């Protein structure tokens, strides 16, 4: 495979991991509803039990997403994580709180009480979702940074990627980024409701209807937020970037960049629309039918398709997947931020095992979810 | 960029505290996962409910520990990006791959089969459950393999070359990452986890014996934990010996710092106990030690397996003495010259870049030739003085002794524990003291294990990548205050969670010890 092919392939893998991660964020969505939806201790325990057997998959996908980004596009890893410091640190901090909470919340001697751990789960569920959405939104709305590889030769300031002094807070308080953050949060909450409906079955009619109502409200807010995000995205001016030998040669502003990306690569638009249809079908049928419990599969597939399309629009078509507002020439693309052909090839062979991993996860999931 | 040294120091502190906390949980995960799998195997073979209860008891402790290890591990991976962004770019082409592969091959295995192990007792068949327990243990070790391959590569960078066009290092040989150092480091770390888990199991079991509870369960656990720990410790010592030889050849400065040795000799003695002279510098005539008890020829044997061999000290190395890969003493490049040649390498890189921008191919070739000739010393250009390339001697020296002394103690500990478990009734008055010794010993095993890592990581300072990238050139462009805040943030939350973990474990052990675990 050529280097370009490998770069495209690895952006595809990143997109797939991103899509799976967003789907699995239903765990966080469930956590964010612990105190609202879980209005009794038993119901709260039910939510925790449902999400508790899946939290590690979300967590592991996040870690693998980070590792894959590091290996395939190290300049992104270096620039974004080291630059938008506070954004990433808060995300990580919230996931630290989550990691222990499921195991410790009901254990005797947990020192801080069940409610503290439930609060940890709530924080991770809400803050984690919003800020991961903000981080992905930066693929389109950019960051205030510069990249200068020559800095490695400077003894006084040898850092090649330099960010605005706000170090990620500017991204957190950017309203465009927050729109996607809110969309991700309410998508996760809606999916959590549909997953809970699936797990609850016909055990508690009153709780079933309560979850259904919550799915309707969260789904409605998600649809509004997602449409707002798409409106902003399709009218945003992006960058057309020309690279040669892994270096940026020229950058020009491109009005309606992401809209035209999807139109020119029609399959991106088709996948996005298919994803939207799946999500809407899963949501509406779950809400309108008297007792439909398989909505999570439709919205899950739809979510992954839509996220795939959004990632593709960010990375393919000579697009900057991390545009620099400060210095457009510093913008990152899959051409100038990637690892070498050798590394991407080595990683390509490793990635061939991903279907095996997905297969055993699927098998185990089915075994564990047997009623 | 604001005060560079402060950012570097706080970033190092933050990484250190994350790594220290992470390593509180990982070795127990590595060892206890195998012990649990062994016990479940015994259960499946004997169908004895005693072993089922034993498996579930240790598995619960494993689960309590596992969760917090996962949490600290997440932070470590991402700190390479958040705090060491230059490093992430400079060697990301090589270093990122093991981390990604770790995620694909190990983390999902641990997460998926761990869920079956913890929650699947009534949902899958007993054989499937046992397979999941073993796969969780294997997944933990595979995870350790990849991260230790990455760590070893930082200390012995191979399988790569510098690409001046991209101004970074690129991978040219993936399998070279599995160097002898990487393989040795992997086994050393994993076996030390086995030893630690063995001490933990014995300590907890002795608590029950001390309280006159669950005698049969405790003795059975001591036998499993004792043998497992003893084998682990012996293999740790064997691989530790291999590590010493590798360090002597590839990181002689680290070995010299471990010994506080400034002027080496043929037939060099090993310092057993000593008080370092705080006034000693590499270039003054002060004595190395204020007080010293040494073992004749010990260091020569340790470093080269040859009692007459020469082992260079810090001053020797700074002046240009070293040992090559074959173990022969050679006169190599002094540190002062390394700094000069590092500067030549960086100057040549600058010229190469200027020529590339100007499209001057001939100048590029000339600059590249100069760069390649001096690239092995690239990182030394960041130093103003040779003493910046010397690791903290006192800390490395002390940690090495703590590791060795405690390691030797635990060898005796395992032997005595096994002897008592097989031969002597623990309840007899004369031996009850061992229960207290065993309980008190548990935290010292952690100290021993952490000290080993401190030797490995403090001893290689100031390098993130040996000879190529010092910490001062590996950091992110972030304000010191931000790192100070996040350091305290993580220090606080890790401590809070550690307190909860220990408390939960103690409550669980106390509660279960009152139940009849073996009939």
Image (spheres, helix red, strand yellow):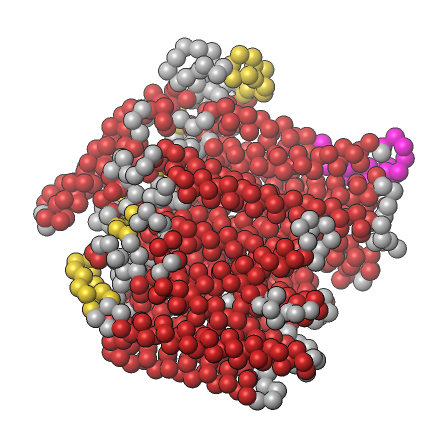
Q: Residue at x 37, y 41 (%)?
A: B479
Classify the position of the N terminus of chain B by image quarter: top left
Q: Which residues are magenta?
A: B411-431
Classify the position of the C terminus of chain B by image quarter: bottom right
Q: Name the residue at the bottom extreme.
A: A289
Image position, residue B215 (x, y; %): 86, 46
Image position, residue B98 (x, y; %): 44, 53
Residue B375 image-quadrant placement? top left
Give the side of residue A5 with respect to residue A124, left or right.
left
From this view, report whether residue B270 is shown above or below residue A205: above
- Exactly how many numbered labels are in the figure? 0
> In terms of depth relative to the viewer, which is nearer, A347 or A146?
A146
Q: Is residue A351 visible?
A: no
Image position, residue A171 (x, y; %): 36, 57
Give the side of residue A256 with respect to residue B475, left or right.
left
Q: Residue at x 56, y 46 (%)?
A: B493
From this view, report whether residue A178 is shown above or below residue B445: below
Q: Residue at x 39, y 58 (%)?
A: A172
- Asked whether residue B408 is drawn in magenta, I would say no
> In terms of depth relative to the viewer, which is nearer, B146 or A336?
A336
Give the side of residue B278 with respect to residue B189, left or right.
left
From this view, report whether residue B127 is shown above or below residue B425: below
> In terms of depth relative to the viewer, which is nearer, A340 or A194?
A194
Q: Residue at x 27, y 69 (%)?
A: A236
Q: Name the residue at the right extreme.
A: B428
Image position, residue B111 (x, y; %): 58, 61
Residue B197 image-quadrant placement? top right
Q: Is residue B115 visible?
A: yes
Question: Which secondary structure type mostly characterizes the magenta part of the structure?
Answer: helix
């Amino acid at each position: 495979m050529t280097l370009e092919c490998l770069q495209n392939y690895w952006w595809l893998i990143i997109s797939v991991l991103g899509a799976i991660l967003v789907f699995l964020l239903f765990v966080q969505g469930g956590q964010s509803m612990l105190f609202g939806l879980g209005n009794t201790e038993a119901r709260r325990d039910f939510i925790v039990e449902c999400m508790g057997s899946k939290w590690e998959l979300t967590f592991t996908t996040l870690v693998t997403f980070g590792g894959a980004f590091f290996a395939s596009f190290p300049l992104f890893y270096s620039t974004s994580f080291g630059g938008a410091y506070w954004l990433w640190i808060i995300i990580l901090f919230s996931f630290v709180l989550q990691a222990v909470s499921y195991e410790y919340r009901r254990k005797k001697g947990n020192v801080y009480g069940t409610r503290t751990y439930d609060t940890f789960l709530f924080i991770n569920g809400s803050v984690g979702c919003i800020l991961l959405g903000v981080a992905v939104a930066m693929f389109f709305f950019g960051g205030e940074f510069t990249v200068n590889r020559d800095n490695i030769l400077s003894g006084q300031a040898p850092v090649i990627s330099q960010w605005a002094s706000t170090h990620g807070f500017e991204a957190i308080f950017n309203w465009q980024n927050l729109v996607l953050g809110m969309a991700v949060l309410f998508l996760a909450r809606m999916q959590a409701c549909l997953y809970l409906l699936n797990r609850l079955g016909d055990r508690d009619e009153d709780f079933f209807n309560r979850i259904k109502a919550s799915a309707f409200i969260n789904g409605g807010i998600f649809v509004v937020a997602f449409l707002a995000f798409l409106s902003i995205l399709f009218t945003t001016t992006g960058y057309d970037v020309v690279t040669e030998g892994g270096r940026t040669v020229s950058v020009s502003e491109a009005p309606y960049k992401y809209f035209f990306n999807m139109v020119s690569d029609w399959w991106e638009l088709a996948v996005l629309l298919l994803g939207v249809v799946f999500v809407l079908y899963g949501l509406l049928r779950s809400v309108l039918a008297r007792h439909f419990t398989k909505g999570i599969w439709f919205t899950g597939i739809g979510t992954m398709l839509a996220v795939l399309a959004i990632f593709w629009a960010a990375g393919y078509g000579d697009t900057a997947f991390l545009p620099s507002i400060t210095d457009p020439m510093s913008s990152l693309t899959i051409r100038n931020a990637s690892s070498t052909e050798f590394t991407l090839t080595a990683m390509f062979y490793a990635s061939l095992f991903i279907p095996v991993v997905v297969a055993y996860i699927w098998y185990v999931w089915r075994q564990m979810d047997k009623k | 960029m604001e005060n560079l040294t402060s950012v570097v120091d706080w970033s190092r502190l933050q990484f250190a505290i994350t790594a220290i906390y992470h390593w509180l949980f990982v070795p127990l995960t590595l060892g206890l996962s195998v012990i649990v799998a062994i016990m479940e195997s015994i259960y499946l073979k004997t169908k004895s409910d005693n072993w089922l209860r034993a498996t579930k008891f240790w598995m619960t402790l494993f689960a309590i520990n596992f969760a917090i290890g996962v949490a600290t591990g997440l932070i470590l991976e991402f700190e390479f990006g958040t705090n060491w962004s230059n490093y992430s770019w400079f060697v990301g082409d090589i270093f990122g791959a093991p981390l990604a592969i770790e995620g694909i091959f190990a983390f999902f295995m641990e997460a998926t089969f761990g869920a079956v192990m913890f929650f699947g007792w009534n949902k899958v068949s007993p054989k499937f459950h046992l397979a999941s327990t073993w796969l969780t243990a294997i997944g933990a070790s595979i995870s350790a393999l990849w991260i230790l391959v990455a760590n070893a590569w930082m200390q012995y960078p191979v399988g790569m070359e510098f690409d001046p066009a991209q101004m970074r290092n690129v991978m040219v040989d993936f399998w070279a990452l599995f160097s002898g150092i990487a393989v040795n480091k992997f086994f050393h770390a994993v076996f030390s986890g086995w030893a630690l888990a063995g001490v933990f199991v014995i300590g907890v079991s002795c608590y029950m014996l001390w309280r006159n509870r669950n005698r049969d369960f405790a003795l059975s656990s001591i036998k499993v934990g004792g043998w497992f720990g003893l084998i682990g410790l012996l293999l740790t010592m064997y691989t530790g010996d291999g590590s010493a030889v590798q360090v002597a050849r590839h990181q002689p400065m680290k070995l010299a710092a471990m010994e506080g040795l400034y002027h080496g000799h043929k037939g060099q003695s090993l310092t057993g106990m000593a008080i370092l002279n705080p006034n000693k510098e590499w270039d003054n005539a002060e004595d190395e030690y204020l007080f010293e008890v040494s073992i004749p020829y010990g260091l020569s044997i340790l470093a080269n397996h040859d009692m007459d061999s020469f082992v260079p000290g810090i001053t020797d190395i700074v002046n240009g003495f070293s040992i090559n890969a074959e173990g022969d003493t050679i006169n190599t490049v002094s540190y002062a010259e390394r700094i000069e040649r590092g500067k030549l390498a960086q100057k040549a890189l600058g010229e190469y870049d200027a020529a590339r921008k100007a499209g001057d191919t001939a100048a590029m070739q000339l600059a590249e030739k100069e760069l390649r000739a001096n690239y092995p010393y690239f990182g030394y250009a960041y130093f103003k003085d040779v003493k910046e390339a010397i690791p903290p001697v006192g800390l490395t020296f002390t940690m090495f002794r703590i590791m060795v002394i405690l390691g030797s103690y635990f060898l005796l500990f395992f032997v005595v524990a096994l002897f008592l478990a097989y031969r002597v009734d623990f309840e007899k008055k004369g031996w009850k003291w061992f229960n207290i010794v065993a309980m008190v010993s548990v935290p010292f095993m952690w100290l021993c294990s952490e000290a080993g890592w401190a030797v490995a990581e403090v001893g290689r300072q100031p390098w993130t990548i040996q000879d190529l990238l010092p910490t001062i050139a590996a950091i992110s462009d972030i304000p010191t205050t931000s790192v100070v805040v996040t350091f305290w943030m993580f220090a606080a939350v890790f401590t809070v969670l550690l307190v909860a973990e220990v408390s939960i474990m103690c409550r669980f052990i106390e509660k279960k010890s009152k139940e009849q675990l073996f009939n």
